[in-house]
Image: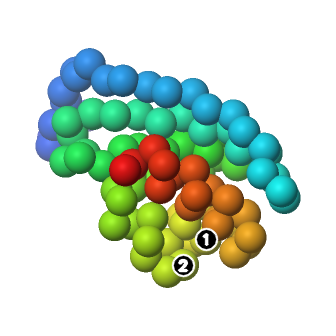
Amino acid sequence: MERFYLYDDVEDTKTRFVSFTGETQRYDLAILQSTRFFGKVLVMDIQFNRMAIIGADDVEEEGYLEHAFNRNPEEAEELREYLRELLN
């Protein structure tokens, strides 16, 4: 089979693993920083196998974290508080 690659790049990245507990949930995250994401970070929720490319503007968008990480509003707000600290 012939493949048509859109890209096949290797890049050094910075990865941070964070685990914390909030009032409602434990959060296990991997946060990957790369030039590929134009100033945003790739946030991976290890427990729930969800991920999203997130910037400071995305954190403030209503319903974004709830949808991206399939979390209820209370859980999303705990995650939002952490991401605000991380991205600012």
Residue occupying image coordinates x 15% and y 43% = 6
The residue drawn where x is 58% and y is 58% is 81
Residue 33 is situated, as x and y percent measured from the top left of the image, at 34, 34
SS at mark 2 in the image: loop
Task: Give the Cα separation between the discs numbered 2 and 1.
Answer: 5 Å
Q: Pointer 2 and pointer 1: residues touching (CB < 8 Å)?
A: yes
Is label 1 in a helix, a strand or a loop?
Answer: helix
Disc 1 crowd rating (10 Å Cα; few below 14, some 14-19, many 20+) is some
- Residue 63 disc label: 2
**Which of the pair 26/81 is nearer the observer?**
81
The residue carrying mark 1 is 66
Amino acid carrying label 2: it is Gly
Determine the residue positioned at 69% across, 34% down: 19
Disc 1 residue type (three-letter): Glu
Residue 8 location, quadrant = top left
Residue 84 in sight: yes
Question: Which of 15 and 21 lies nearest the eye of the viewer?
Answer: 21
Reply above or below: 71 against 49.
below
Query: Which x, y percent locates residue 65?
Result: 55, 66
Image coordinates for residue 20, horizontal then vertical, percent: 72, 39
